């Protein structure tokens, strides 16, 4: 994916079925691609805690509609996102 020196990567379920150490390794790679290589990255994933710890902005989709968007902190505190996806006790490290 990186051979063509892309400006944008689309990653689907990049954290699915991985152990904790591999997730941490991928998180570092994603942050480095964003900050050092200046590559924009769009990630679709159900592993919210792994995903939100490496993203600047996020969106929650429900029934093909954006129901919440914002920074990770804004999303976690958004009552609509809590009801549809996170629940009331979800936190990220």
Image: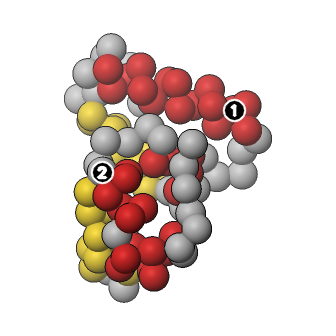
Query: Does residue 58 show up?
Result: no
**Quadrant including the N terminus:** top left
Q: Label 2's element?
A: loop
Mark 1: few, some, or many residues within 10 Å (few <14, many ≥20)? few
Instruction: Decide if residue 29 is on the left or right side of residue 16.
Output: left
Dot 2, crowdedness within 10 Å: few (<14), some or many (≥20)?
some
Q: Which residue is mark 2?
A: 71
Q: Nearer the viewer, residue 27 or 89?
A: 89
Measured as percent of width and height from the top left, residue 47 is found at: 58, 56
Residue at 38% across, 64% down: 77
Direction bottom: furthest residue: 63
Check the image and report above or below for 55 versus 60. Answer: above
Q: Quadrant of residue 4?
A: top left
Label drawn at residue 22: 1
> In terms of secondary structure, where does tag 1 sit?
helix
Q: Is residue 63 left or right of residue 45?
A: left
Q: CA distance from mark 2 to mark 1?
A: 24 Å
Which image quarter: residue 31? Answer: top left
**Whole-percent x, y for residue 72 in the image:** 37, 51
Q: Pick out the residue farthest to the right.
A: 19
- Relative to 40, is 12 above or below? below
Taking the spot 55% from the left edge, 56% from the top edge, the residue there is 91
Q: Residue at x 56, y 63 (%)?
A: 90
Q: Does 33 sit above or below residue 27? A: above
Residue toward you, 61 or 7 = 61
Query: Where 19 sits versus 22, above or below?
Result: below
Q: In the rendering, at what x and y percent does residue 86 appear?
A: 51, 70
- Tell me the quadrant of the picture where the C terminus can be found: top right
Q: Is residue 50 visible?
A: yes
């Amino acid at each position: 994916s990186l051979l063509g020196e892309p400006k944008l990567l689309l990653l689907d379920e990049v954290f699915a079925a991985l152990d904790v150490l591999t997730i941490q390794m991928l998180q570092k790679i994603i942050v480095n691609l964003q900050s050092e290589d200046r590559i924009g990255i769009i990630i679709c994933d159900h592993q919210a805690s792994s995903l939100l710890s490496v993203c600047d902005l996020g969106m929650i989709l429900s029934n093909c509609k954006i129901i919440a968007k914002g920074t990770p902190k804004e999303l976690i505190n958004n009552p609509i996102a809590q009801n549809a996806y996170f629940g009331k006790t979800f936190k990220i490290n």
